[in-house]
Amino acid sequence: MSFYSARVCIIGSGLIGSSLALALKQAGAVADVVGCGRNSATLQRALELGIVDHYSTDIAVAVQGADMVVLSVPMLAMREVLAQLQPVLQPGVMVTDVGSAKQSVIADARAVLGDKLGQFVPAHPIAGTEKSGPDAAFAELFRQRRVIVTPLPENNASDVARVVAMWECVGAIVECMDAEHHDHVLAATSHLPHLLAFTLVDSLARMDESHEIFRYAAGGFRDFTRIAASDPTMWRDIALANSFEIKQMLLRFQHELEVLQHDLETKDAQALFERFSRAQQAREGLQF
Amino acid sequence: MSFYSARVCIIGSGLIGSSLALALKQAGAVADVVGCGRNSATLQRALELGIVDHYSTDIAVAVQGADMVVLSVPMLAMREVLAQLQPVLQPGVMVTDVGSAKQSVIADARAVLGDKLGQFVPAHPIAGTEKSGPDAAFAELFRQRRVIVTPLPENNASDVARVVAMWECVGAIVECMDAEHHDHVLAATSHLPHLLAFTLVDSLARMDESHEIFRYAAGGFRDFTRIAASDPTMWRDIALANSFEIKQMLLRFQHELEVLQHDLETKDAQALFERFSRAQQAREGLQF
């Protein structure tokens, strides 16, 4: 199924929303992109970069004539944006999002969209970099990346297919799953690692000799902590939006660290070797 | 000070020792490199790759005619190698190492080198990749990388200067510090991150749905866990050789995770935001 839209409205000018706009344009899949957000300077920058063709800070103005509205704002802003969207959302216009946690935005939509709930198809492109904002955007961001769509019982199949087609036309590999499972999987491979990286860098930065410690950091540390340069607002929101699953994963990891601490304490060479070997084999088996 | 050696003996055919051999050759700083190790097949491979010019599995044979002996074996093999080296080490021949922890190898040297202790100048090139063995070696590995030399009171200044000169001639930035401080700093920026990456990957790999979880891993996870593909033997040895400092750092990190878990539990948005912001600023300030 191919995708074409006369006008897409992108709410939020971050890396994901801006990259989607560029990708849809590059694919010839959209005639016109309208930007919407609270910050005029950022929207103006998106206009200068050719990401949007026009913009408005007024959501009622921005969605006029759009047949697809994409919410790409931090998780905790979703409910407010959906609430503003609800009264001006015309029949037949679709809404989707790019949020990194899905149960939370679905709860928001259920709370405020009323009988327009079926027009909202939740989705999450598993793509990004540690950079933020329209200047970091690029059209190739979604190529060969996975996008998870978590349809609602209220969605009709053709609307879900249209969101799938939009992501496929920018090069993504799209799969559907339920929102709970999505949040569980992403807590493991994305949310927990980000929180660990933030916590390690913050912990070292607050040590008295932090300047000297960082001075001797090498390539391993650079790669391990790259995600700690990610946007703090976005990650505060993800941490809170998916806190249940993240807490479970973190608890599991804390238990593993207790075992590790014990293995170091007892100098259990065999246990350390087995742990590192299993990890090495698992990591080498991964395809990216 | 420039460096030249008629013959360097490299004990161990791993990434670091092999890369040093290639780098010294590329710099025209060595006439002849002798390989030494337990595994003939690996030494033969190093010969084929032009890393060593000849080799022996007998340390007494390998060190003949060498004026510089470089120990590049896993940490827990250091004492045995030093013990084998002691009776065949001629006056005026220097010994250095590339171990990632320094107090442990210094204790080994003190235990077995006797009155030849002053010939050993401990050092650690902070360089490497997640790959291992002679096939992963490359001459440029040490360019613009830091090498820390931790001299002994028994060393004379000209011997220390010679080790410094060797590393400078392959492009490294060399600094001296005491071994205890080295082990503290490296526990923070290298040893703890490696152990966290191994532990996370192992923990996820042992989950029932590990195959599916890894399937949705993206670029952030790839970078965060790259170091988990490192050699398990080497890291078992580092974990044990520097266990005191690593345990302290790990304990500190475990405490930070308890605070994080509490912040998630109480949904403390401000605390999460401040933590992530401090980390982001610290990480963005780092130069690599």
Image (spheres, coloured by chain):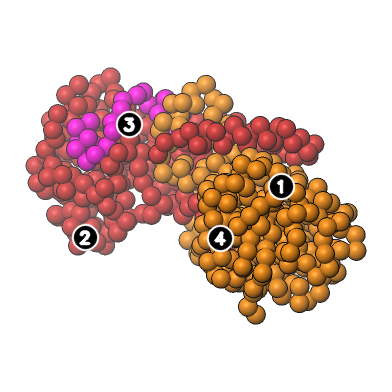
Chain colours: A red, B orange
Mark 3 belongs to which subunit?
Answer: A
What secondary structure prevails in the magenta region? helix
Report which residue position mark 3 lands on.
A148
Report which residue position mark 4 lands on.
B22
Report which residue position mark 1 lands on.
B57
Where's residue B135, x and y in %? Answer: 52, 48
Q: Nearer the viewer, mark 1 or mark 4?
A: 1
Instruction: Please name the residue shown 36% across and 38% down the image.
Output: A126
- Asked if residue B12 lies left or right of residue A85, the reply is right
Name the kind of residue labelled 2 in the image.
Leu
Magenta span has A180? Answer: yes
Report which residue position mark 2 lands on.
A49
Mark 2 belongs to which subunit?
Answer: A
Q: Identify the secondary structure beneath mark 2.
A: loop
Name the kind of residue labelled 3 in the image.
Ile
Any part of residue B152 in sight = no
Name the kind of residue labelled 4 in the image.
Leu
Name the kind of residue labelled 1 in the image.
Thr
Q: Eyeballing the image, is B119 above or below A268?
A: below
Mark 4 belongs to which subunit?
Answer: B
Instruction: Please name the residue shown 47% across and 46% down the image.
Output: B223
Q: Give the Cα separation between the discs numbered 2 and 1.
A: 63 Å
Question: Which sits earlier in the primary sequence, circle 2 or circle 3?
Answer: 2
Q: Give the Cα separation between the discs numbered 1 and 3.
A: 55 Å
Highlighted magenta segment, given as a residue range: A163-186
